[in-house]
Amino acid sequence: MAIEEPKFSLALKDGAFELRDYAASVVAEVAVTGNQDEAGRRGFRLLAGYIFGGNKARQKIAMTAPVTKIPKGQTIAMTAPVTQIAGKDQGGGEWLVRFTMPASYQLADLPLPNDPAVSLHAQPPARLAVLRFSGLAGEAKVAEATRRLLAWLGSRGLVALGPSQVARYNPPWTPWFLRRNEVMVPVAPA
């Protein structure tokens, strides 16, 4: 069974780099603290609770990919995967961890979360610059992928509209060498 991913149209492909246009979507998100990995685990557990029936209707909602992390306090036009923002300090910080809801849902269709930490939001369409990488998405690897993506943006005359995010697509039991990750940066639409 395939896990749903947000739909996008490919605006540009340049080797490993892509510009993607994502449609509007709905996300469930939580604010958590900790380093990149701690925040991801804590946020994932809270959001999984919501989609596995921790809501007023006790309704199960299909899991989607990716999971994203974004530094809290920064506004980003983000519609796709679960992401983690690169560049936070190593000791910890505040993060928004997001699940994109299945495309069949509108904001009004989703059941209210039981946990007040979980919030639901409509996201506008967005253009994202993306660099895919495999393996573990540790802080050093994410920082290097982010550096490469920002350098590519600069070479193309594109400007980042927000911080980089890391999107993780695979469950934790996936062998490290088969994992799919992406660093994403919102940019101005054409």
Image (cartoon, rainbow, N blue to C red):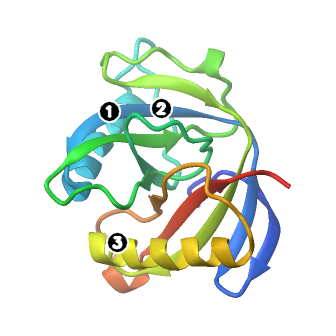
**Drawn side of residue 23 relative to residue 94, left or right:** right
User: Callout 1, which amino acid?
Assistant: Ala
The residue that label 1 is drawn on is 31
Q: Which residue is mark 3?
A: 137
The answer to whether 24 is drawn above or below residue 185 in the figure is above
Q: What's the residue type where badge 3 is placed? A: Ala
Residue 9 position within the rendered picture, expressed as x and y whole percent measured from the top left: 81, 60
Instruction: Using the image, tell me which numbered label, if any, was put on residue 28.
Output: 2
Q: Distance between the Cα atoms at labels 1 and 2?
A: 11 Å
Residue drawn at x 66%, y 29% as measured from the top left: 105
Above or below, 135 against 164 in this view is below
Evaluate whether residue 1 shows in this view: no
1 vs 2, front mark: 1
Q: Looking at the rendering, in which quadrant would you find the N terminus?
A: bottom right
Disc nearer the start of the sequence (3/1)? 1
Q: Residue 49, labelled with which disc? A: none
* Label 2 crowd bin: few (<14), some (14–19), many (20+), radius 10 Å: many
Instruction: Place residue 79 in its image quadrant.
Output: top right
The amino acid marked with disc number 2 is: Ala
In the rendered image, residue 25, in percent from the top left (x then y), is placed at 67, 36
